[in-house]
Image (spheres, grey):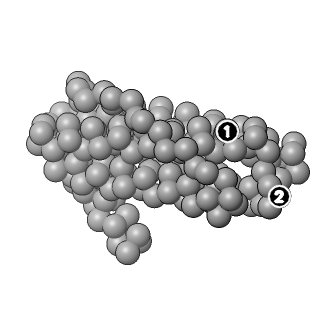
C-alpha cells in the first residue's frame, strides 16, 4: 500500500510532535519531583511514556507501509514552572496542539481517500478527546478545591491516583 508524500510528511511531523511532547512531560515530571509534587511526578512520568508509545505507533505504521519513519531531534523543553496549575495548563495547551495536528492529518486522509491511514488515525482522534478531557478536569480541580497548600496537596494526590490507574490499564 502506498501513501502520499503529503501524508508521509504529516505522519513524520506527528512523530516529532509526539517526541517533543514526551520530552516536555519528562521535564514536567522532573520539575514536579524536584518541587515535591510526588503525585505530579508520577503522573507526568506516565504521560511521557504514553507520548513515546504514541510516537512508536506512528513509526511502526510507516515502517509497515514500507515508508522510512523519520526519527527527529527534540527541542529542549521548558523546565521551570511557577505552579502545579501552570504545569497542567501548559500540558493542556500541548494536547490541544496535538489534537489540531491529528485533525489535519484526518482531513488529508479524507481528501486523499486514504482509508487505511484514516482508520489508523481514528484511534488518535479518540485518544485526544480523552487526553484533553483529563487535563481540563484536572485544571478544574483548582477552581473546585482551591489553590491553598492543602488544596494543592489534594490535587497532587489526585495526580498520583491517575498515574496509578493509567499504569494499571497499560499493563
**Is 165 situated above or below 159?**
below
In x, y percent, where is residue 76? 33, 29
Residue 18, percent from left and from top: 49, 44
Within 10 Å of the Cα at label 2, are there few (<14), some (14-19), or many (20+) other Cα atoms?
Answer: few
- 107 sits left or right of 123 in the view: right
Q: Nearer the viewer, residue 75 or 126?
A: 75
* Image-quadrant location for residue 107: top right
In terms of image quadrants, where is residue 144?
Answer: top left
Q: Residues within 10 Å of mark 1 (few under 14, many from 20)?
A: some
Left or right: 94, with 79 as reference point:
right
Q: In the structure shown, which secondary structural element does the residue marked by tag 2 occupy?
A: helix
Quarter of the picture containing the C terminus is bottom left
Q: Element under label 1?
A: helix
Q: Would you name the residue on which mark 1 appears?
A: 9
* Image point (42%, 36%), residue name: 73
Closer to viewer: mark 2 or mark 1: 1
Query: Residue at coordinates 58% horizontally, 49% vertically from top-left?
Result: 69
How many numbered discs sit on the rendered protein?
Answer: 2
For the N terminus, give its image quadrant.
bottom right
Q: Residue at x 47, y 39 (%)?
A: 72
Q: Earlier in the sequence, mark 2 or mark 1?
A: 1
Tell me if residue 5 can be seen.
yes
Residue matched to label 2: 115
C-alpha separation, residue under disc 2 versus residue under disc 1: 17 Å
Q: Residue 128: image x %, image y %?
A: 57, 49
99 is higher (above) or lower (below) than 62: above
Nearest the viewer among 21 and 62 is: 62
Left or right: where 90 falls relative to 155: right
Amino acid at each position: 500500500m502506498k501513501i502520499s508524500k503529503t501524508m508521509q510528511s504529516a505522519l513524520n511531523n506527528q512523530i516529532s510532535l509526539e517526541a517533543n511532547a514526551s520530552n516536555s512531560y519528562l521535564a514536567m515530571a522532573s520539575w514536579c519531583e524536584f518541587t515535591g509534587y510526588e503525585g505530579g511526578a508520577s503522573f507526568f512520568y506516565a504521560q511521557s511514556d504514553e507520548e513515546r508509545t504514541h510516537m512508536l505507533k506512528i513509526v511502526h505504521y510507516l515502517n509497515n507501509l514500507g515508508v522510512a519513519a523519520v526519527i527527529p531531534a527534540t527541542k529542549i523543553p521548558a523546565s521551570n514552572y511557577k505552579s502545579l496549575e501552570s504545569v497542567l495548563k501548559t500540558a493542556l495547551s500541548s494536547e490541544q496542539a496535538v489534537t489540531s495536528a491529528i485533525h489535519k492529518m484526518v482531513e488529508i486522509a479524507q481528501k486523499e481517500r486514504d482509508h487505511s491511514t484514516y482508520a489508523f488515525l481514528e484511534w488518535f482522534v479518540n485518544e485526544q478527546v480523552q487526553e484533553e478531557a483529563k487535563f481540563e478536569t484536572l485544571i478544574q480541580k483548582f477552581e473546585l478545591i482551591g489553590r491553598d497548600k492543602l488544596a494543592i496537596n489534594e490535587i497532587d494526590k489526585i495526580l498520583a491516583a491517575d498515574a496509578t490507574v493509567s499504569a494499571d490499564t497499560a499493563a
